[in-house]
Image (cartoon, rainbow, N blue to C red):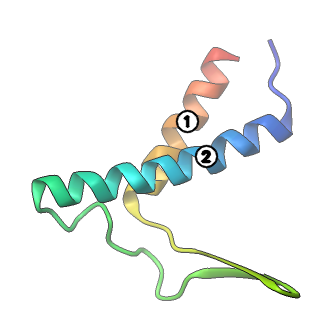
Amino acid sequence: MKVSIGNFLIALILGLFIGAVAGALVDKILNLHMLSKYLLREAISFELYIIKIEIQLTPAALVGMVVTGYLVIKKG
């Protein structure tokens, strides 16, 4: 079964958010500061008139995105 590009991108974005939240929770519970460390100096920002979106990448977010991408491709 083939996955459409739109569904794949939505799954990757959700995986990015879920990974970031899971990494922040694990850091708080285990008192680590490794998973929620920022990888970029400044956030990636998109500004559309009155809406501004900023995204900061963390190792946990990248892991969540990779795992989600793998599961979507594997499951179809």
Residue receiving disc 2: 14
Q: Residue at x 60, y 36 (%)?
A: 69
- Locate residue 43 relative to residue 9 in the image: left or right: left
Quarter of the figure with the N terminus: top right
**Amino acid found under the numbered disc labelled 2:** Leu
Could you say where residue 12 lies in the image, as x and y percent from the top left?
Answer: 64, 45
Name the foreground residue: 27 vs 39: 27
Could you say where residue 53 lies in the image, as x and y percent from the top left?
Answer: 69, 76
- Locate residue 31 relative to residue 58 in the image: left or right: left
Q: Residue at x 52, y 73 (%)?
A: 56
Q: Residue at x 42, y 74 (%)?
A: 39
Q: Are marks 1 and 2 in contact (CB under 8 Å)?
A: yes
Is label 2 in a helix, a strand or a loop? helix
Q: Residue at x 82, y 19 (%)?
A: 2
- Locate residue 43 relative to residue 59 in the image: left or right: right
Residue receiving disc 1: 68
Name the foreground residue: 47 vs 40: 47
Quarter of the figure with the C terminus: top right
1 vs 2, front mark = 2
**Amino acid found under the numbered disc labelled 1:** Thr
Could you say where residue 38 lies in the image, as x and y percent from the top left?
Answer: 39, 75
Check disc 1: other Cα within 10 Å, few if <14, some if 14-19, many if 20+: many
Callout count: 2
Name the foreground residue: 64 vs 31: 31
Is label 1 in a helix, a strand or a loop? helix
Does residue 31 sit above or below 55 in this rendering? above
Residue farthest along the top direction in this orientation: 1
Q: Specify the label residue 6 is tagged with.
A: none
N-term-proximal mark, 1 vs 2: 2
- Locate residue 37 relative to residue 30 in the image: left or right: right
Residue farthest along the front direction in this orientation: 50
Per the model, the C-alpha gap separating discs 1 and 2 is 8 Å
